[in-house]
Amino acid sequence: MRSLRYLQSSLLLLALFAVAVGFMDVLFSTAPLPGETGVAPTVDSNYRFFAAIFVAVGLLLLWVSLDPLEHTRGLALWWVSGAVFLGGLARIVSLGVAGPPAPFVYALLAVELVVPPVLVLWHRALTRASDTAAP
């Protein structure tokens, strides 16, 4: 099933990205961000905390990528997708409250609002096809 392999590969790439970026943010905080020269200790603490959560999301996606059609892993994919989509909605709130961010954040926003629904719909289609093919 070629589409399943593509889903697994996509999840693996997303997982590796999340783990790498999350660890980078835990280690370096906001320093790699354009225009950031330092933040207050409370903001730094929160940033690193949520970076660690991002690492956990990546590890969870790595686990899901091994067998995304297994029921428990599929549920985890849906929950992670929902959480990332919710994060994208939070960025929209930030746009309204704090103003426009650095341009690359718009790319992140697009990914957060588009990729999760695509993954859920893709997973749903594969699950239905798998259920139909089962004896």
Image (cartoon, rainbow, N blue to C red):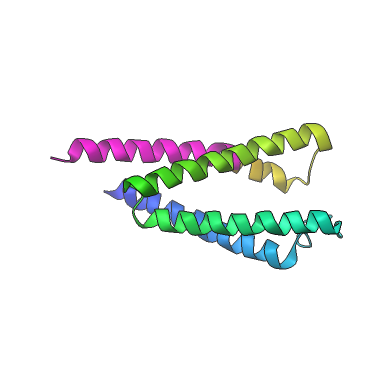
Q: Say left or right for 59 vs 31.
A: left
Which stretch appears magenta?
112-135
Q: Position of residue 10 (x, y in %)?
A: 44, 52
Q: Is residue 120 magenta?
A: yes
- Residue farthest to the left, as pictured: 135
Question: In the figure, residue 121 lies in which quadrant?
Answer: top left
Q: Position of residue 55 (x, y in %)?
A: 58, 59
* Nearest to the observer: residue 76 or residue 61: 76
Dominant secondary structure of the magenta stretch? Answer: helix
* Nearest to the observer: residue 110 or residue 20: 20
Q: Position of residue 34 (x, y in %)?
A: 79, 55
Q: Looking at the picture, does residue 64 appear above or below residue 124?
A: below
- Residue farthest to the top, as pictured: 96
Q: How many marks?
A: 0
Q: Looking at the picture, does residue 19 appear above or below residue 107?
A: below
- The structure residue drawn at horizontal position 51% and vertical position 54%, both measured from the top left corner, is 14
- The structure residue drawn at horizontal position 60% and vertical position 55%, both measured from the top left corner, is 54
Q: Looking at the picture, does residue 18 appear above or below residue 103?
A: below
Q: Is residue 41 magenta?
A: no
Residue 99 visible in image: no
Question: In the figure, residue 85 lies in which quadrant?
Answer: top right
Q: Looking at the picture, does residue 100 appear above or below residue 43?
A: above
Question: In the figure, residue 32 lies in which quadrant?
Answer: bottom right
Residue 61 visible in image: yes
Q: If the image is split into quadrants, where does the C terminus sit?
A: top left
- The structure residue drawn at horizontal position 78% and vertical position 46%, both measured from the top left corner, is 102
